[in-house]
Image (cartoon, rainbow, N blue to C red):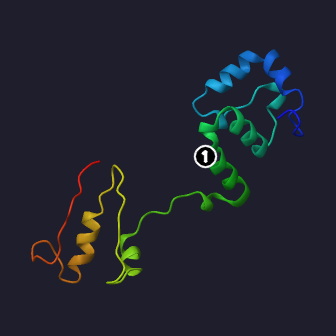
Amino acid sequence: MESVEGFGGLIQNMEVDYLQWKRWFGEEKAETIDMPRQFKEIDLFKRMLLLRALRPDRLTSALAMFVAEQMGERYVEQMPFDMQETFDETNNRLPVFFVLFPGYDPTVDVEKIGSTMDISIANGKMINISMGQG
């Protein structure tokens, strides 16, 4: 990396300021805190280069920060899931597959939409199949 503009003297700086580098390296969210002295003012792109080399586990978060800074927050914010919108995009020939995450259960939303068309578990027109945890 020393051959990349802005990183001259990196190795020497890491040797001299090893305690600062050790502290930075040990941070849970290294992409959000100041770099050691000489590299404190580097831009986010160069910070990502260092993260890629030294803390690749923090690169995804740094990339989100970079995109938000360069293009805007709307490009990294997760839009809320809208079951009705999903339903409107489907038809009887298009299967829908949900990958569930802890804390979200689409059953209530599916039942709500089904009830508007007289489709429910009670009348036997809807079947809720659980594949269990895996």
Could you tell me residue 4's position as x and y percent?
87, 39
Q: Is residue 5 in view from this perspective?
A: yes
Q: Is residue 128 left or right of residue 106?
A: left
Badge 1: how crowded within 10 Å, few (<14), some, or many (20+)?
some
The residue shown at (55%, 58%) is 77
Could you tell me residue 114's position as x and y percent?
23, 77
- 116 w.r.t. 10: above or below: below
Q: Is residue 32 in view from this perspective?
A: no
Q: Amino acid at mark 1?
A: Thr
Q: Secondary structure at mark 1?
A: helix
- 99 w.r.t. 16: above or below: below
Could you tell me residue 112's position as x and y percent?
25, 72
Could you tell me residue 46's position as x and y percent?
79, 42
* Extreme residue toward the left, this view: 123
The residue shown at (72%, 22%) is 21
The residue shown at (79%, 43%) is 43
Quarter of the picture containing the N terminus is top right
Q: Is residue 8 left or right of residue 15?
A: right
The residue shown at (61%, 24%) is 26
Q: Is residue 93 left or right of residue 30?
A: left
Q: Quadrant of residue 7?
A: top right
Q: Quadrant of residue 55?
A: top right
Task: Name the one closer to the observer, 42 or 89.
Answer: 89
- 45 w.r.t. 89: above or below: above
Residue occupied by mark 1: 60
Task: Name the one closer to the observer, 82 or 60.
Answer: 60
